[in-house]
Image: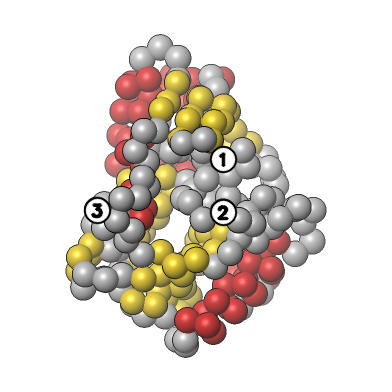
Amino acid sequence: MIDQAARRRLRAQGWLHLHRDGTIEQARGWLGDIASALSDGRDWPRPRGPVVELVAREGSRYATQRAAAVPFHNDGVHLHDPTRYVLLWCDRPADGGGDTLVVRGDEIRAALAPELAQRLREQPVTLRVGDHRTQRPWLGPHPDDGDEVLSWFDPELADGAELEAGPDPDALVGGLRRAIAAAPRWRLAWRRGDLLVLDNLRTLHARDAYRGPRRLLRCVVGPWAAGRESP
């Protein structure tokens, strides 16, 4: 399912949209196979996370586990080593809404004011979410090829999220949100069987609010992906 041509498209575009009908158990196997292919040959201690169901969970601290809209973000920015790839398969689309939107990080970077881009390169941002604390610049080199990539955790993603970003953090958050809003975006209106592979370091994604039941399967890939279920 992920041959060399698909890998090249994923590298160039930042995402792959596929379609494969089947049962949930079959889809779990497909996601596992893709995760294995994307981590093959890499010296990653725990490269594949579990395949989990994405459904609304009452009382969750994370916006991704509610039916309301989710702002643009990269997965796992609040973790020591962010997720490299996110795999999603749709079992049941929502009765209305629930589209996933994708933007390329380089398009956002191009829309940033030069002084804000320089600040994001030079000044580490401290992020606290629950028991997790990270500190890193939010513009930095991709670990595989050195391309400059953007990391972004919108404070609205999690209740109680705290950012420390030097003087005037509101200007940093506002500037990033404006650049994201100005960037071209791709939209996926989910159908059952849709399968989306995201390069989590080269793209950001968001989700529209939805109504009615909605169920996706999700698997993440990265150096320490095993055991991760939170966004």
Question: Which residue is at 40% across, 12% downward?
Answer: 167
Mark 3 Cα shell of 10 Å, populated few (<14), some (14-19), many (≥20)? some
Mark 2 Cα shell of 10 Å, populated few (<14), some (14-19), many (≥20)? some
Q: Secondary structure at mark 2?
A: loop
Q: Residue 68 bears which disc, if any?
A: 3
Quarter of the image holding residue 228? bottom right
Between circles 2 and 3, the one closer to the viewer is: 2
Q: Residue 228 bears which disc, if any?
A: 2
Q: Are marks 1 and 2 in contact (CB under 8 Å)?
A: yes
Q: Are marks 2 and 3 in contact (CB under 8 Å)?
A: no
Q: Is residue 8 visible?
A: no
Q: Residue 58 bears which disc, if any?
A: none
Answer with left or right where residue 121 lies relative to residue 174. Answer: right
Q: Residue 79 bears which disc, if any?
A: 1
Quarter of the image holding residue 56? bottom left
The percent position of residue 19, horizontal first and vertical second, equals: 45, 79
Question: Which residue is at 46% across, 50% downward?
Answer: 231
Q: Amino acid at mark 1?
A: Leu
Question: Which residue is at 48% across, 29% downward?
Answer: 127
Q: Residue furthest top?
A: 167
Looking at this view, is 7 or 160 the one in front? 160
Q: Amino acid at mark 3?
A: Ala
Q: Secondary structure at mark 1?
A: loop
Up/down of 3 relative to 230, above or below: below
